[in-house]
Amino acid sequence: MDAEREQPTEQSTGPQTVPSAGLSRRAVIGWAGAGVAIGAAGVGTVAAATMDDKGAPAPAAPGAAEIPFYGDHQSGIATPVQDRLHFAAFDVSTTDRDALVKMLKDWTKAAAAMTGGREVGTGAATGLPEAPPDDTGEALGLPASRLSLTIGFGPSLFETSTPDGQLVDRFGLKAKRPDALIDLPKFPHDNLDPTRSGGDICIQACADDPQVAVHAIRNLARIAMGTASIRWSQLGFGKTSSTTPDAQTPRNLMGFKDGTHNIAGTDTAALADHVWAAPGDGPEWMTGGSYLVARRIRMHIETWDRTSLKEQEDVFGRNKGEGAPYGKAKERDAPDLKAMPAGSHVRLAHPDSNNGLMILRRGFSFTDGTDGLGRLDAGLFFLAYQRDTRKAFVPLQNRLAASDKLNEYIQHVGSAHFACPAGVRKPGEWWGQALFG
Amino acid sequence: MSARRSTAASLLTLAVAAVVLTGCSQKKDDTASADAIQVNASDSACELSKTSFPAGHVSLEVHNKGSKATEVYVYAPGDKIVTERENIGPGTKAAIAAEIKAGDYEVACKPGMTGDGIRQKITVTGEGAPAKGDPRLDAAVASYRKYAQEQADATIPVVQQFADAIKAGDTVKAKSLFAASRVGWERTEPVAESFGDIDPKTDTREDGLEAGQEWTGWHKLEKSLWADNTIGDNEKKLADQLVTDLKDWQTRVGTADITATSMANGAKELLDEVATGKVTGEEDRYSHTDLSDFAANVEGAEYAYELLKPVAAEKDAELSKSLDTEFADLKTLLAKYKQGEAYVSYDTVGEADRKTFSDAVNALAEPLSKLAAAVVVK
């Protein structure tokens, strides 16, 4: 992508003009009115939402819900969970730090455009007729669809080991590796596929329209060619937890509501305590960021489906119909943990069983068709954000792996860990600037 | 070779398009449908609303009124595909667009998508916009034309030896010559493929066969040599036919429509061939000599690029620099797999290494896709 072409020297500032830094997908549909529909998010960054990525006032977005790209925290973490996911882990192939920085800058521009419902670069159908379009075009005419793009940096970006065991500081970042960005320990029952684990950089794309999420990853992967390539990726549908407390908790593929007691995206106190890295927690570049654990959890669907209802409910500690904890009537009634079977999932995972420990979950169901034995290759793509993985996911997963009744029906088959920095605060800043700058 | 039709068609489309596009960035003609030529295709007819029209942007609106799926081709003399559209279902319409310069052409409707089709002669008149040729690009085209001819000339003796070995029943020798016999073709594949009638005879894979098409050419012999382990009368006959068909290519290669645009896009298409067919091991699935084809594709692409480089480096220095780097990286990677004059068997190349190849091909092909616009338009 030609960076120069994307940044016109002149910008139009008229109130009814298309944002200057990129073509508007919405413009294709036409300006249907002035009704403002900032995404349901609006988490304190409404001002940023009305700026395009050159800082010029942007026109109101008719019915096209946008998640603000700019802000103190990255979107896609506390943001109300969208319906669809395309998650990709990249391996950086270049050894040239400048090339990596250029990719991150190009990515940031493309991400700001796409989350704003605009086209990448010179667009999908408006560039030179002789050249392939900068934007791949499958999102043309679609609204922003609450697309959020969240970046994270994996341990291997800071340090990798050569075949003979030597540790290499690849980009001079070793000293900036947060202590909390650990190499995750091996948990009991893990059966990790290395080709679905790890990665130097991750991008989490969430949107209400799968086409929009896929388009985002596809365009970023294309920009990355020659610098980084996708190591593995995962499509997700059907969010399995909610960050909006009033919404009904969606069901996982086992048919259960799981993740009822999640951190609300509006609960700033809980977010500060459990999700955002605070000054002094680690390196300064991570302040305002969060640590992401991604786990591909395969469900043994067929055996689960022939398990009695009672056993299924015993495994979770909730009833299946309403999702109420044992002994209670409603899903959100405070659970009486002692009323639940000792190894039930909810009892073990509940903060009250873990010294108040909480993580913010954003998991999605997945199915990748069937395996060679005709079994559904399906399960939960677990995404959890926390302030310090060592104090959150690790003790929790150790506890679950040791005694969760659910283990009979699930297996962790992929695993990755990323440090997601604070947000890009304004146009001109870029993903990773505090780390590389 | 899977992309035979589309690459051949796009090369030629671009070749003729270059005439009008050179020197300026023209917008697409959006009034096309009003001036579109109606093509009524049925099971027994191929009727055009006009058979003579001016050069430039031409639109065909095909209406399949027959009972079978059809396909429609526009052929330049020698059955060179200018443009085509497959799989037009019964009762459906499809639009075909192309830039066509003056000359005599044929439109073929192929009900059932087989055979030569029902032909209709058309005449395209006028000059089109004259090319404002950059003399350096003209020189590049001339050099590339010479290269294409040299590659064809050099191929014939090797193919002859390959065929002779088969006829002598010397499978060991035939196997040793298989990959080498393809190098010249693979280096100039977009040009070679532009002869729509030669490519299906020489370079079709078994899965690419159309109903009723006899399987001939390299890959049939490859299967006989490696998978079936049989050399019979039919193979001997096919070996002779391969020589004959490739001599036809050698004779006609000089007439290929080559422009700076088609060179640049041809280079990209060579990498696309690698990305879709070779990096997966599909191309030479019996002999596993994919890396030889792979290397030849890269060499051919690089040759085209080197000829265009003086202009590319001037008009888009950054692009040129990145192409230099990516070509070098890919060649370095390939060199690791070299074994004497040949390459290691591709079935010994593991998944992780194939991924590395795939990444390197993407890293090169992505900037290479911008070469045509950089050279011709900027």
Image: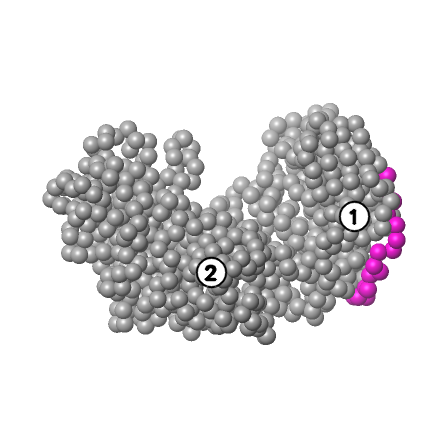
Give the amino acid type for the residue marked by disc 2 in the picture: Gly
The answer to whether residue B131 is magenta is yes
Image coords of residue B169 (percent x, y): 70, 29
Residue at the spot of label 1: B35
Q: Residue at (68%, 30%) from the top-left corner?
A: B90
Q: In the rendered image, which residue does mark 2 sit on? A: A35
Q: Is residue A115 above or below residue A312?
A: below
Query: Marks 2 and 1, Cα distance to the nearest angstrom?
Result: 41 Å
Q: Which residue appears at 76% of the width and 43% of the height?
A: B60
- For the residue pair A177 and A245, the one nearer the viewer reads as A245
Left or right: B74 in relation to A17: right
Q: Position of residue A336 (x, y in %)?
A: 13, 45
Split into 4 quadrants, where in the image is the C terminus of chain A?
Answer: bottom left
- Left or right of A381 on screen, residue B209: right
Whole-percent x and y of residue A140? 56, 53
Residues drawn in magenta = B121-136
